[in-house]
Image: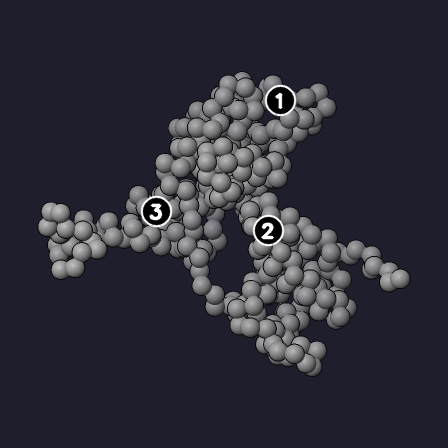
Amino acid sequence: MAVEPAPDALDDAVAEHASFLAVERGLRPNTLAAYRRDLQAYTRFLRHHGVRGPDAVTPALVGEYAGSLHTPRNGHGAPLAPASAARALVAVRSFHRFCVDEGLAAADPSDDVAPPRVPTGIPKPLTETEVAALLATADGPEPRGLRDRAILEVLYGAGVRNSELVGLDRADLDLDAGMVRVLGKGAKERLVPVGRPAREATAAYLAAGRPELVRPRGRAGDAVFLNARGGRLTRQGVWMLVHAAGERAGLGERVYPHVLRHSCATHMVDRGADIRVVQELLGHASLATTQVYTQVSAARLRAVYDAAHPRARRPAGDSPGEPR
């Protein structure tokens, strides 16, 4: 009977990365399974070269692995299809960026590997009406209702990440000034403005909700958002309550914390916000990451064109589908 190798630092890092993808990014089960398969193949390659931890991976090894995706494997069989090879490299790059962000490695060895050319998906934000319906599901006066309303308002109103939300301490809030200090990726602090609904919901929770959730042995500390046991709410806890709110609002499985961040940014750009201001709000290191929100829907493009172009006006009773 074969003996399974003991877990090592590589196993631990891959497991933490999988949790991050599921909880922080809210990836669907099929996507998570694809990441898992790709990283299993990658870690087999690394172990074959004697690597047992993410901090021991070199750029040369990552480059060798990338090259192997386009050649017959183990001397036989077809190489991966271009789309599959691109997806495998996306998984590798995501893993190494995560390791650097979490302090599991000092540098990203995949930096020198050219990113694969893959189609960029257009974010699928909620509409403003859907956001209103979502917020309306958490309007009860009980402590958890006050907490959940504050969480939904802050996620959408400030566009913060799930991890940034659960990391908030009361000292990070300046509700009078409408500002919140968050600790983003790479331990970078930034100040984020929050609107009146989020300020009011958070103030109501702090006054009447949080005191009721504190437990003598809950180890709440200065955490803003607490769970039912009196401890700091986790990313998984936030994911579950946002997902449940989405189902109550009739939005199915579309809603998780990152969708509210997408919606915040998209709605701001739709209403004319400068893209660099949105970049600062979201804490993106690269403007290219933020520019995905500048893509507009076909319906909005049609509406703007019809309103602005002098040759777009149609006679009364005419419809877009009728021949001219």
Q: Element at badge 2?
A: helix
160 on left or right of 59: left
Q: Position of residue 157 (x, y in %)?
A: 43, 36
The answer to whether the residue labelled 1 contacts the one labelled 2, judged by CB atoms less than 8 Å apart, is no
Earlier sequence position, callout 1 versus callout 2:
2
- The Cα–Cα distance between marks 2 and 3, rounded to whole angstroms, is 30 Å
Q: Amino acid at mark 2?
A: Pro
> Residue 296: x, y in percent?
33, 52
* Residue, disc 1: 213
Q: Label 3 is placed on what type of residue? A: Val
Image quadrant containing the N terminus? bottom right
Q: Report the residue that reaches farthest toward the left.
A: 315
* CA separation in Å, label 1 and label 3: 37 Å
Secondary structure, mark 1, is: helix
Gap between marks 1 and 2 measured at Cα:
32 Å
Going by the image, does 56 lie left or right of 135? Answer: right
Q: Residue type at mark 1?
A: Leu
On the image, numbered disc 2 is attached to which residue? 29
Q: Which mark is residue 269?
A: 3
Indicate whether 47 appears above or below 140.
below
